[in-house]
Amino acid sequence: MKETLTTPGKLLVQRLAAIAILLGIWWLVIASGTMPSMLPGVGQILEAIAEAFVSPAFWASLGRTLTAALAGWAIASVIGVLFGLLIGSIGFLDRSTSILIDFGRSFPVLALMPVVIMLLGSNIRMEIVIVALSCLWPVMVQTIYGARRQDAAVADTVAVYRIPPMLRFRRVLLPSALPFIATGVRISASISLLVAVGVEVISQAPGVGRQITLMQQAQRWDLAFAYLFFTGLVGWALAAILQRCENRLLIWKRQEND
């Protein structure tokens, strides 16, 4: 009797197959000569990944980028959750700040970078500020949505029994908002890394973004792709860790959905 793969095993095989197909298409496109000669082949990128893996300069740059990204993300998460719960749970604040919230989340934060550089200089503090401003809005908006979303029967029960504010916060408001907060925090974590690398590319602040620019200037396109690969790998790992934490912390929500 043949053994069948479990669902996680099938998923792993499917993902590996998708990666293999993508690499095969890349190899065929390079071999056909239709792409610019600067585009490296799969073998060159794999060699560059191995070269970057043993490079102290790369790991120092990655550490600096991660420090700025995680610091800005943490600041944005704390501020976004606090203000989101406050705005979402108080009716007149929600109505009066809706225009400001919509404007803020639509504003291109990178446009503020020249002003922030002028005030703080091209350093890690500037990078943290830009990352925090970029990550603030997803967390705050999701938290506001979560604070608004209360079952009518629960809200009526709270009002009838005159439940104290702190007990209402712990037992009603926070549990209903937590799934939305977790989603906003997870989304902003991916944004933080993208923004940190983008800021380093534009401002040439030390980090992975600057290394990518230097490799492009040196015509080392294979190393530039290798740095991009590691950046994407770190972003994927961060999202996977947060998803796992969310599944563990909000197991009661999964049981409700099931």
Image (tube, rainbow, N blue to C red):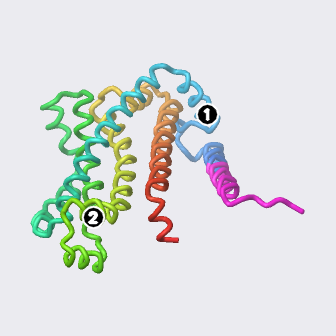
Main secondary-structure element of the magenta-colored stretch: helix
* Quadrant assignment for the N terminus: bottom right
Q: Which residue lies under the disc numbered 1?
A: 46
What's the magenta region? 1-22
Q: Residue furthest right?
A: 1
Alpha carbons under labels 1 and 2: distance apart: 49 Å
The quarter holding residue 46 reads top right
Residue lying at 33% horizontally and 35% vertically, measured from the top left = 201
- Residue 199: x and y, percent? 30, 37
- Residue 185: x and y, percent? 35, 51
Tag of residue 173:
2
Which badge, 1 or 2, is on the more N-terminal residue? 1
Reply yes or no: does residue 5 show up in magenta. yes
**Relative side of 125 to 225, left or right:** left
Relative to 240, say whether 44 is above or below: above
- Residue 87: x and y, percent? 17, 61
Which of the pair 75/42 is nearer the observer?
A: 75
Label 2 secondary element: helix
Residue lying at 28% horizontally and 79% vertically, measured from the top left = 152
